[in-house]
Image (cartoon, grey):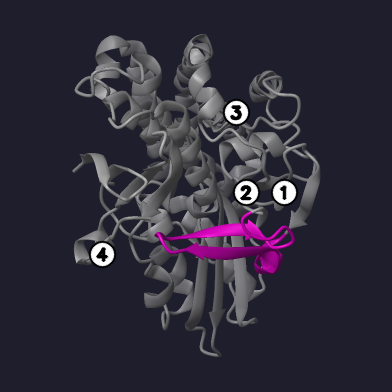
Amino acid sequence: MAQTITIDPVTRLEGHGRITLKTNDQGEVSEAYFSVTQVRGFEKFCEGRPYYEMPALMARICGICPVSHLIASAKACEAIMSVEVPPTAAKLRRALNLAQTIQSHALSFFYLASPDLLLGMDADPAERNIFGVAKAHPELGRAGVGLRRFGQHMIELLGRKRIHPGWVVPGGVTQPLEQAKREEILALLPEAYANIKMALTAYKRIAGRFQDEIDSFANFPGPFMGMVSESGGLAFTDAGLRMIDAEGLVLVDNLEAAGFDDCIGEAVEPYSYMKFPYLKSLGYPRGAYRVGPLARLNIASHAGSPLADIEMNEFKKLANGPVLGSFHYHHARLIEILHGIEAIEQLFSDNSILDKHVRARAGVNRQEGAGIAEAPRGTLMHHYKVNDNGQITWANLVIATGQNNNAMNKGVLQTAQRFVKGDKLSAGMLNRVEAVIRTFDPCLSCSTHAYGEMPLAIELLAPDGTRLDLVQRP
């Protein structure tokens, strides 16, 4: 790859994405890379910390999905403690994770993706944003804001803070649910239902306009992985992992956190600091797989809630077998929002949610522990080792965005080969290359443990390495 990337302290702190395209003698794209240039730091600088501090520390990795890190980290600590979380605490964690999934999916769909979907891939960049959506489609703009507000407010009610709540701790949660908060959350549900139904109707009305993008946005056969309940339904917090192939055949089933490292390896490439996880039995890169909403809907046989079950049955008719096109991540997110609202209603309608026993206590009973949860973007794994005093001696985090890394790279190549011709880049082409990455809703803060916006640079190189064109976003 004819390029040199210099990483300085600023880039270590702020998200930085780079796409490089190489053309052949006919002006066609032959190679494409999505490079992430931060250095991951959390695993190293948490060494020496007491294990019970890890959930609150790990939540600082990301301001969008801190709850998933809280839960996966707490579960790893509970493996070290050898304790079982009280049933009501498990239900409350499940509800908190669903609330985070709702707000994160609303952010992804309405704020980041809907400008492309509602205004068009080739729309004026000055208008192609959430403000343009609100102007052209005010009812959908309000629906997006409302769904995100619902998820964020619920996190605040349960966890006392909208961002980085400290409510989830090793052994359960710090405080039980109060009746007044239960009633307030239930009262918010009718508006949430109305907003998500509107969004699903709007999406299905316009999805057919994007057949070229559906065909070329990371649309290829390969494995999918995600949590699945004992009955085969959607699961986000307490379940084993399943992996299927492109035909729907099960490759791995009921994979627990303790066996994750035995099954999943992490490859590296010279152009990115983000790792490339893969199924060891298939090897790399053949064993690279996808996670997240699309994977979860492909793996699960049903949602487990009435309205989402109807939507899921309709979704599965998009393909004879697993839905392979990554453009459909958008649709899958909306279905998961609907399921999340229904599941929260189910959980909070049960009086056991008010039980006061919400925390188990213990010390170090094992020197190693792992925990898994489904983050909005896909499977999240935390794995720790401790000494006799309970201090972290080693940690490894396998993040959803990293597990989609190979698929994002393949999607960039597919999209560039479909839309890039000749020696000149257009704004529409740039937007489509960005848009294929947005289908995965990548979180470079999570995957690289940095913070900030993601500058993007796209180079078009001739066969001899000469730069033909450069388009970049500061």
Q: Position of residue 126 (x, y in %)?
A: 19, 23
Residue 469 in picture, x, y percent from top left? 24, 38
Q: Residue at x 45, y 69 (%)?
A: 54
Residue 241 in view: yes
Q: Are marks 4 and 1 in contact (CB under 8 Å)?
A: no
Q: Secondary structure at mark 3?
A: helix
The answer to whether the residues at label 1 and label 3 have Cβ atoms under 8 Å apart is no
| Three-letter code, disc 4 | Ile
Q: Nearer the viewer, mark 1 or mark 3?
A: 1
Name the one closer to the observer, 170 or 429: 429
Instruction: Give yes or no for residue 385 being in the magenta stretch.
Output: no
- Work out how far the residue at label 4 is from the one at label 1, CA to CA, in angstroms: 36 Å
Residue 342's mark?
3
Q: Are marks 2 and 3 in contact (CB under 8 Å)?
A: no
Q: Point out the frontmost of discs 2 and 1.
A: 2
Query: What residue did someone put label 2 on?
Result: 289
Based on the picture, tell me whether residue 269 belongs to the magenta stretch. yes
Q: Residues within 10 Å of mark 1 (few under 14, many from 20)?
A: many
Report the amino acid beneath label 2.
Tyr
Side of 99 relative to 87 (left or right): left
The residue beneath circle 4 is 7
Alpha carbons under labels 4 and 2: distance apart = 28 Å
Q: Which residues are magenta?
A: 256-285
> In the image, is residue 224 above or below residue 433?
below
| Residue 150 visible to an observer of this rendering | no
How many residues crowd mark 4 within 10 Å: few (<14), some (14–19), many (20+)? few
Please tell me the numbered disc located at residue 243. 1
Q: Looking at the image, is mark 2 or mark 1 earlier in the sequence?
A: 1
Task: Residue at 41% x, 48% y: name it.
Answer: 34
Residues at badges 2 and 1 in contact (C-beta under 8 Å)? yes
- Give residue 87's position: percent from left, percent from top: 67, 53
Mark closest to the chain's N terminus, 4 or 2: 4
